[in-house]
Image (cartoon, rainbow, N blue to C red):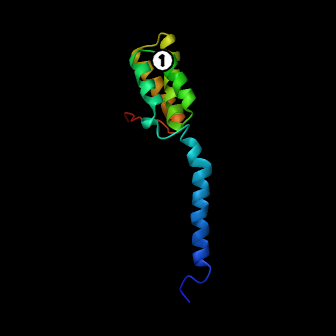
Amino acid sequence: MKKGGPLSPGLILLLILQDLVHHRAHLEPAQGAGPGLAARPSSTACAKALHNGDIDTAIALCAKQRGSAANVIRAGLERYQQVRSEGASKEKIVSETQAAIQEANGSRCRCSSAT
């Protein structure tokens, strides 16, 4: 008999199956409606809309996409639009937009402080 015993191959198979089910149930829906964001025509359309200054269209395209990256981009664009309409300074617009993106991405600001 091998060192792992007769249950080892079965347990390894169960772990592999569990990973496959987890990937199918949780990771694939996070990708949104199709292949990767960079490969989609909607990302090109979003970039063109931003280049033309049409933020509302870019937000709508990100909302239609429904993927993780699109949601993060949309959060940043919505915050940018809100702060800009309030007439904030350029520095505040940038910092607020970055904070919204980091919050949507689930990360904390790792700003260095002078101490």
Residue at horizontal 59 percent and vertical 70 percent from the top? 13
Residue at horizontal 40 percent and vertical 15 percent from the top? 52
Tell me which amino acid carries mark 1.
Answer: Ile
Expressed as whole percent of the image width and height from the top left, the position of residue 29 reads 59, 43
The image shows a total of numbered marks equal to: 1
Question: Dot 1: within a 10 Å radius of its alpha carbon, few (fewer than 14), some, or many (20 or more) residues?
Answer: some
Residue at horizontal 62 percent and vertical 68 percent from the top? 14
Element type at marker 1?
helix
Q: Which residue is mark 1?
A: 55
Expressed as whole percent of the image width and height from the top left, the position of residue 89 reads 42, 14
**Image quadrant where residue 33 sits:** top right
Expressed as whole percent of the image width and height from the top left, the position of residue 23 reads 57, 53
Query: Is 34 left or right of 39, judged from the image as shown?
Result: right
Q: Is residue 38 above or below residue 90?
A: below
Q: Is residue 61 above or below residue 25?
A: above
Query: Is 63 left or right of 93, judged from the image as shown?
Result: right
| Quarter of the image that includes the C terminus | top left
